[in-house]
Image (spheres, coloured by chain):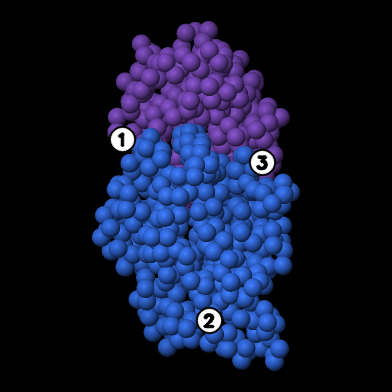
Chain colours: A purple, B blue
Amino acid sequence: MTTTRSGALRLESIFSDLRAHGRKALMPFIVGGHPTIECMPDLLCALDANGASAIEVGIPFSDPIADGPVIASAMHDAIECGVTPAKVLDAIARARPRLSCAIIAMVSVSIVQRLGTHKFIALARDAGVDGFIFPDAPLEEADELSAAAAAAGLSSSLLIAPTTPPDRAARIAQACTGFVYMLARRGITGATGAAQHTNLAQRIAHIRSATPLPIACGFGIATAADVRNVVHAAGADAAIVGTALVDALRDTASPISAAETLMRQLSAGLHP
Amino acid sequence: MTATALSNVPDAHGRFGAYGGTYVPETLVAALHQLDAAYTEAQHDPAFKHELDALLKNFVGRPTALYEAKRLTAYARERASASHGAHIWLKREDLAHTGAHKINNTMGQALLTKRMGKKRVIAETGAGQHGVATATACAHFGLDCVVYMGAEDVRRQHLNVVRMKMLGAKVVPVEGGSRTLKDATNEAMRDWMASVDDTHYILGSVVGPHPFPKIVRDFQSVIGCETKAQCKGAFGALPDCIVACVGGGSNAAGIMAPFIDDSSVKLIGVEAGGRSQALGDHAAPLTFGSPGVLHGSMSYVLQDTDGQTATVHSISAGLDYPGVGPEHAYWHDAKRVSYTSIDDNEALDALVLLARMEGVLCALETAHAVAHAVSVAAQMPRNHHLVICCSGRGDKDVNEAARLLEARS
C-alpha cells in the first residue's frame, strides 16, 4: 500500500506498482499558491484523484530563470499575493492525508539556502513532501542538498538536458534518487514552439543502462499526444506537464474543474 | 604568487572560498564547460593574447591615462588637517572607447565567441554601458547581437539605447519584475537556455556562474596592471589606496585584483547606498546583505527572509543590482577589501564636484567612488597617493542628473 509509506519509499512503491501493471505515470506541475493558496489543497486532491502519480509543486521564486512567461508570471503573481514557502508547505500538509500520490517540491537553491538546507528539508518532510527537484543545482552543487534529502528519507532528482554529454548524463542519473528528470528539449518551460524531442528515445535508452530508476520527462509536453509520444514512443516512465496546466488554471472561475478536465485529456496519452 | 596567496582563486569548481560555484539549470552547464575550456586554451595561446593586446591598444585606446586630479586634491586638503590630504589620481577608464571599462571585457569575450565558432551574442545591460560595449565588439567582429535591458533602464539611459541600435544591436526591453538589471539578466539567461548551441552570453560583470567571474576579472585586470606600472612611473611607488564603485563589481575587481597580494595598498569598494538603509531603498549587498545564491553563484545578496530577491534602488542604473561578484564576497570576508556605501545625493554632488573641479564629467556609478574617495583622501597623509577608478563617462547620465538636480533646487 502506497499510503502507508512516505518520502523516497512512497515514490519507489508508486513506480514499482506502475511497472508491475505495465502502466505509465502522469506528473502534473503546479505553482504553489497559484491561482490561490486557498484552493491549493483541493487542487492537489483533484490532481491526485484524476490520475496524478506524483505532483510537482513549484515553490514560487522571484527569479526563476528556467521558466517561461506562464510559470514565471504565475510565480510572481503568487508572491504578490503573499504566498511564501511556509504557506505552500502548509497547504501540502493539509492535503496530504487525502492524497495517495507523491509530492515533489521543485525549489530554487536560493530559497533553500536562505532558510538553511537541513531546516528547509525537515519542514518539507514534516509537511508531507516526498522528494525534491533543485532546478538550479546541477551535479557540481547537488551533493550537500542530495545528502540532506537522503538523510531525511526524501528523494532528490537531478535534471538531464539535451545538451548534457552522455557520460555526464550517466553520472547525473546515478546521483538521482526517486526518479531521473529528463528535459525533453532545451530552452525554458512552456508549451510554445512544438517540442522537438530530438533523440529522446536514444537518450532514454542510454539512461536506462546507467540506472534502474524511473525516468520522467518534462518541458514542452502539453497534450495527450505529447504524453503518448514521451511515454510510449520514447519509452519514459512518466510525463511531466507544467505550463499547460498552470495556463489552464489562470483566469478561470473554477480551477478545480479546469484541472480535472485537463488531467482527463492528458491521461488518454498514457494508453498506447 | 604562492599557492596560499589570497589571489589564488577560484579553484577548479569556480569557488572563491565559500563563494562562487555554478548554480544554473543543467541545460547551461555544457556551455559553461565549453567556455571554461575555450578560455583556458586561449590563456595558453600567445596568438590570443597578441590579438587582444593589439585590439586594446588600437581599437579600445589603451593604456588609459592615469591623471593627477590636482584641484580635487586641493579641495580635499581644504577639508583636512595641515598634514593631511593625499594626492588623488584618476584611472581614466572613461577615456576607453565607448566611454567605460566595459569594453575591456567585451572585446575579450567576443574573441572567445569567435574561437568557439559561435555567431550570435546576447548580453544584459543596466546603465547601457555594457550593452554599448557588447554592441561595439559585435559590430567589430560581425556577430549578431541582442541586448536585454530593463524597461526602467531603457527610459533613464535612453542615449545608450540609441547608441546600441545605431551599432546594429537589437535591444529588448524587459518588462518583468523590477524592470532593471536583475530582470535583464534573467531574460538573457532564458534566451541562452534555448540558444546555447550557437550563442555566447557576454556577461558584463564579475557575477554569474563559473567561469564568468574569473573571465571578466581577468579581462578587466588590465586596469590594475596598467595602474601599477603608471604609479611606479608617476611617483615611483605603489599607490596607498584604491577606491572603486561596486555594482556587480567588474571595474573594482579589474583595478584591485593585481594589487590583492600587495598588502600595503588599501582597497575600498563603494556600493550604492540609494535613498536609505532600508531593504529596497539601496543596492549595497556587501554593506547590508548576507550570503545567498543569485544568478548562478553564491555571494552576498539582498533577499527577504524567504530567499526572494529584494527590490533594490540606486540613482545609478549600473549599480542597481541586488547581488555582487563572488570574489568581492571573498575579499570582504578575508577583510582584504573594505566596502562601504554612498547614497544617491552624495553621488550626485560628487558628479558635479568632479565636473567642476577637473572638467571630468563622470558616470553616476563612478561618482559613488569619487564621493567616498574625497573623504578618505582627507584622512590620509599628504605624501600618500589615492587612485580612483574613473570607470566611465557621464554623457549617458546628463539628462537624469539634470532632472534630479532641478528637482532638488
Closer to us: mark 2 or mark 3? 2
- Given the image, on which type of amino acid does mark 3 rest? Thr
Could you say whether the residue bearing mark 1 is in a helix, strand or loop? loop
* Picture residue at 26% right of the left edge, 54% below the top: B168
Rounded to the nearest whole Å, what is the CA distance between mark 1 and mark 2? Answer: 57 Å
* Picture residue at 60% right of the left edge, 47% below the top: B20
Of the pair B35 and A112, the residue shown nearer to us: B35
Residue beneath disc 1: A192
Residue beneath disc 3: A117
Residue A83 pos. (x, y %): 52, 48
Q: Are marks 1 and 2 on the same chain?
A: no
Residue A224 pos. (x, y %): 33, 22
Could you say whether the residue bearing mark 3 is in a helix, strand or loop? helix
- Given the image, on which type of amino acid does mark 1 rest? Thr
Residue beneath disc 2: B69
Is residue B176 visible in the rendered image? The answer is no
Q: Say how many tags the image has.
A: 3
Residue B396 pos. (x, y %): 37, 70
A248, above or below B300, in the image: above
Graded by Cα atoms within 10 Å as few (under 14), some (14 to 19) or many (20 or more), the crowding at tag 1 reads: few
Q: Are marks 2 and 3 in contact (CB under 8 Å)?
A: no
Of the pair B128 and A189, the residue shown nearer to us: B128
Q: With A69 as the anchor, is A101 left or right in this view?
A: right
* Picture residue at 46% right of the left edge, 14% below the top: A205
Could you say whether the residue bearing mark 2 is in a helix, strand or loop? loop
Image quadrant in which you'd find residue B401: bottom left
Q: With A247 as the anchor, is B278 left or right in this view?
A: right
Graded by Cα atoms within 10 Å as few (under 14), some (14 to 19) or many (20 or more), the crowding at tag 2 reads: many
